[in-house]
Image: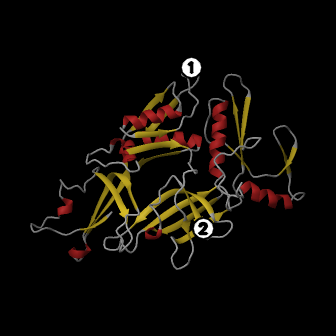
Amino acid sequence: LVLSMAPGDDGEWDLLRADTRWSLLRRLTIGFRVQPPDETTVTAERIVFDGYITIVAPTFGEQRVPESKLELRGLDASCLMHLEARHRTWRDQSDSAIVRQLFGDYGFGADVDEQGPVRHEAVASMHQRGTDAEFMRQLARRHGWECNVRPVEDAEIEAAPHPGRGVVGHFHPPRVEDTQPLLTLAPADAPSLKTMSARWDSHRPTRMEAWHIDAFSRRMQHQSWPKDPPRPVIPKMGRFSRQDLLDSRLGELRGRLPTSSSSDGEPRTLQPRGFQARLVPHDNTEVDQLAWADHLQSDWLAEAEATVQGLRYDGIVQPGKSVPIAGGGELVDGDWYVRSARHRWEAGQATQAYEIDLHLVRNALGEVEDG
């Protein structure tokens, strides 16, 4: 947030006084409404940020006025969870129970999906060495889930130092089934998408394998994703996954590529495969979860960066939901999952130029066929 800055009649810079609201760890809530020019109807209204100021950076220009400015940077309310590094052990709780307790400790609401296993003290425990935010993201990484704090939709904002349950902590898989209004690349003279650049590549695994020696039985445990028979990690967002595309291309090269052995010793043709080797499980259930999490990350086939012309869009784009796109052709059209949304506007220009920068991902190309 960039503010113009000027000295007052007494020579003091009002925005830099010790008691100003523009000081470190002051709560900052940003909300706005979209109302097209010359219209009285509000098309959308939303709180897009509820957090705290974490950086204050004044700049005094050569021409004190109007070149002086105050730049403020902030983080959402989860910044409170970054303040203290802790060293503690969690016993007899699942990851979901741990995260729900941590969100509650800070007074936030919690949208947490259930996920085991419960690590019983006699068998295993979870050790935390770091801040609560770092620890929760580590737990989310083990499941391939999202972990963040977002404002509650349509919540009443109270003027208080702490947002309370006006913000909610999320700990769950990507919810691609939650959709938003359509974004369009056409017509060229009035699209809701100003620009978009996408990419997809071949060299990421389509199958993930994980092995672990059980500490009690001393037996080798093995899990792999996708399962056989296949079951989707998350709903397929198009017709052609990376597996579909590569199966076709590698089939054309059959006979020119080496063969490898499957877990049962049978020869098979070369396939994009990765190993889960970064995290340590304590039982076969966690072996399966870690393979699932790695497969989920590699299963995102396409990524894109896009800029939305906000005044031409029927709503306010939110992260953590899907948005359909049209006008990009057979492969690009369809649902994309919004990883992040960055809103940009200027004083005096908001009625002409309000833009949102999006980071999008997708696990398949092409629109899903009906039926």
How far is the residue under mark 1 from the one under mark 2? 55 Å
Q: Secondary structure at mark 2?
A: strand
Q: Nearer the viewer, mark 1 or mark 2?
A: 2
Residue at 66 percent across and 35 percent down: it is: 287
Q: Eyeballing the image, is 165 above or below 371?
A: above
Describe residue 185's horizontal placement relative to residue 277 as left or right: left
The amino acid pointed to by label 2 is Ala
In this picture the colour scheme is secondary structure
Task: Give coordinates of residue 60: x percent, y percent.
Answer: 24, 70
Task: Give the camera-side residue of 159 and 226.
Answer: 159
The mark total stands at 2
Residue 5 disc label: none
Q: Residue furthest top?
A: 122
Residue at 81 percent across and 59 percent down: it is: 248
The part of the image, by quadrant, that contains residue 131 is: top left
Task: Give coordinates of residue 30: x percent, y percent.
Answer: 34, 57
Q: Is residue 135 visible?
A: no
Residue 326 disc label: 2
Q: Residues within 10 Å of mark 1 (few under 14, many from 20)?
A: few
Q: Residue furthest right?
A: 255
Q: Secondary structure at mark 1?
A: loop
Q: Quadrant of the C terminus?
A: bottom right
Task: Give coordinates of residue 187: x percent, y percent.
Answer: 56, 76
Q: Residue furthest bottom?
A: 189
Task: Give coordinates of residue 56: x percent, y percent.
Answer: 29, 58
Residue 122 disc label: 1
Query: Disc 1, disc 2: CB below 8 Å?
Result: no
The part of the image, by quadrant, that contains residue 301 is: bottom right
